[in-house]
Image: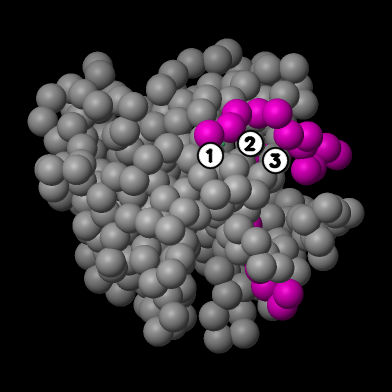
Amino acid sequence: MASDDKQPLITNIYTADPSAHVFNGKLYIYPSHDRETDIKFNDNGDQYDMVDYHVFSLSSIDGPVTDHGVALTATDVPWVSKQMWAPDAATKNGKYYLYFPARDSEGVFRIGVAVGDKPEGPFTPQPAPIKGSYSIDPASFVDDDGQGYLYFGGIWGGQLQHWAEGKFNIELHRETGEPTEGPALMPCVAKLTDDMLEFKEPVQAVPILDENGEPIAASDHDRRFFEAAWMHKYNGKYYFSYSTGDTHYLCYAIGDSPLGPFTYGGRILEPVKGWTTHHSICEFQGKWYLFHHDASLSGGVDHLRCVKARELFYDSEGKIHTTPQ
Ligand code: FUB
């Protein structure tokens, strides 16, 4: 397991939450675009006050990195009031889809989708958020059979703890930000419609189980889901990975179906400089990479982050390592 000893991949602007995909043989990175603000730091994450997205591409992992400029901006999206947080992208039917969370006019996080003809955009947003969507950190996954999935959720500032049976209730876990006993809150997943624009079925919880087949406990802050959902497939298995938030680990769990259940598999990354940790995992030119961020470029300012990459390795049991096996 490694921490933050690599150089930033992107240095021309502050970036975070990198979602990496290979489209047409090139590596595309869809990060958050961090910016300086006067907003006071709090546990709600108000200081993460982003207003647009840039898309980056690389023909080789060693660069150079091309910044394709602004692909979507908050003022283009009628329902967004503020905080364009961690995005992701997918392709299907010759189109490209940018999924993004933001607060609506009531201050509630929702997930939107914007459509483009090229991986780098520009993207045209749908006029309303995806019906039935909530919370943050959408991660899209298109399985080999063409079915699209959207994973999402984040506790504390990500508001997942305020949702029950499809309804937002600010009083739910208001004091603690999450349950303090029993099973942890699980991330969410929904199958996408064929046009990738809506949920095809009701949102489901993504079960993350411990070695005894029990849901990870709410008190197990080293292993419970906090935010930063990601899905990748390796050797026929489905890997759900995520951040543990206040304990600052990137972890993963393995399952036989995109809907889970997933059994906890271990840590991918130790805490990095800065409070948040968020990532994606992607195969590019025959090697597997972890894309993640830390706050090293700003000297440790939590909300001014930079994207990094490092190679990942699997052992014979399918466990993930940051050193060759
Ligand atoms: O970038 C804003 C938020 O910080 C993301 O949505 C979280 O995953 C955390 O990285």
Chain-order first, disc 3 or disc 2: 2
Label 2 within 8 A of ligand 1 by Cβ: yes
* Cα–Cα span, label 2 and label 1: 6 Å
Which of the pair 318/64 is nearer the observer? 318
Label 3 packing within 10 angstroms: few (<14), some (14-19), many (20+):
many
Identified by mark 3, the residue type is Lys
Identified by mark 1, the residue type is His
Residue marked by disc 3: 308
Residue marked by disc 2: 293
Q: Magenta part of the protein: which range?
A: 1-25
Chain-order first, disc 2 or disc 1: 1
Chain-order first, disc 1 or disc 3: 1
Residue 142, horizontal then vertical, whole percent: 46, 73
**Residue 4 belongs to magenta span:** yes
**Residue 55 belongs to magenta span:** no
Instruction: Assign the magenta stretch its main secondary structure.
Output: loop
Residue marked by disc 1: 278
Q: Residue at x 54, y 49 (%)?
A: 325
Identified by mark 2, the residue type is His
Circles 2 and 1 in contact, beta carbons < 8 Å? yes
The answer to whether 196 is drawn above or below residue 58 in the figure is below
Which of the pair 146/320 is nearer the observer? 320
- Secondary structure of the residue carrying numbered label 3: strand
Q: Residue at x 45, y 31 (%)?
A: 249
Whether residue 255 is visible: yes
Circles 3 and 2 in contact, beta carbons < 8 Å? yes
Residue 125, horizontal then vertical, whole percent: 58, 64
Residue 93, horizontal then vertical, whole percent: 55, 86
Label 1 within 8 A of ligand 1 by Cβ: yes
Which of the pair 138/197 is nearer the observer? 138
